[in-house]
Image (cartoon, grey):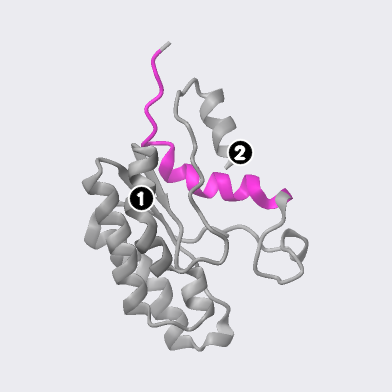
């Protein structure tokens, strides 16, 4: 989030970045909290990156899609534009579940007509880019994540003319 704030500042934007995430949260937790988070920050853009923990717990993909849709619809009702950030699962969860999980993000973005970053960790292909759990990126990998999100977010951010 700090890198995003720096990028926006470099571009002359007056956007403020609010990190409303909770480590380890599932999409159900995000859906339960979204109303209060929107009321507190009144965002013009919402970046939704939820669901990875649903997948790692093997929760039903349809439930995740429903929760993501709730978060997105609440954000849109609050007047925010939305970017959905997708995740993928390791292959040990089984091909059918992994494929259904990956497709869920595409389906929700299409149905809600919002921008999609297909995979947040795209381009992270070296072991040293991950923490010991081999799931979470290290701090040095954060610029890659920013670029992955910025490809969609950059077009949504209005920067004042100079």
Q: Is residue 61 above or below residue 49?
A: below
Mark number for residue 2? 2
Asked whether residue 148 is drawn in magenta, I would say yes
Question: Which residue appears at 24% of the width and 57% of the height?
Answer: 112
Would you call the spot at circle 1 few (<14 residues within 10 Å), some (14-19), or many (20 or more)? Answer: few
Query: In the image, 125: left or right of 94?
Result: right
Quadrant into which the C terminus falls: top left
Asked whether residue 107 is drawn in magenta, I would say no
Q: Position of residue 155 (x, y in %)?
A: 38, 36
Total marks drawn? 2
Predominant secondary structure, magenta span: helix
Q: Position of residue 109 (x, y in %)?
A: 30, 59
Circle nearer the viewer, 1 or 2: 1
Q: Position of residue 151 (x, y in %)?
A: 46, 44
Name the residue furthest top: 162
Secondary element under disc 1, as helix, strand or loop, is helix
Query: In the image, 43: left or right of 88?
Result: left
Question: Which residue appears at 41% of the width and 23% of the height?
Answer: 159
Task: Pick the residue in front: 65 or 121.
Answer: 65
Query: In the image, 124: left or right of 140?
Result: left
Q: Over which residues does the magenta segment extend? A: 140-161
Label 1 belongs to which residue? 36
Secondary element under disc 2, as helix, strand or loop, is helix
Question: Which residue appears at 57% of the width and 43% of the height?
Answer: 1
Q: Position of residue 75 (x, y in %)?
A: 29, 49
Q: Is residue 88 visible?
A: no
Would you call the spot at circle 2 few (<14 residues within 10 Å), some (14-19), or many (20 or more)? Answer: few
Mark number for residue 5? none
Q: Is residue 12 above or below residue 124?
A: above
The disc, 1 or 2, on the residue closer to the chain's N-terminal end is 2
Q: Is residue 156 visible?
A: yes
Task: Pick the residue in front: 141 or 122.
Answer: 141
């Amino acid at each position: 989030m700090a890198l995003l704030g720096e990028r926006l500042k470099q571009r002359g934007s007056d956007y403020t970045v609010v990190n409303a995430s909770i480590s380890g949260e599932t999409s159900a937790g995000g859906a339960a909290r979204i109303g209060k988070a929107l009321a507190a920050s009144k965002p013009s853009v919402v970046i939704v990156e939820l669901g990875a923990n649903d997948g790692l717990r093997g929760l039903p993909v349809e439930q995740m899609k429903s929760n993501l849709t709730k978060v997105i619809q609440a954000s849109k009702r609050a007047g925010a534009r939305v970017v959905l950030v997708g995740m993928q699962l390791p292959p040990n969860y089984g091909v059918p579940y992994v494929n259904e999980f990956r497709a869920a993000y595409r389906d929700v973005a299409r149905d809600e007509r919002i921008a999609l970053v297909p995979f947040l960790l795209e381009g992270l292909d070296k072991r040293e880019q991950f923490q010991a759990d081999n799931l979470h990126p290290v701090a040095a990998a954060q610029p890659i994540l920013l670029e992955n999100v910025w490809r969609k977010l950059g077009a949504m951010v209005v920067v004042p003319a100079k």
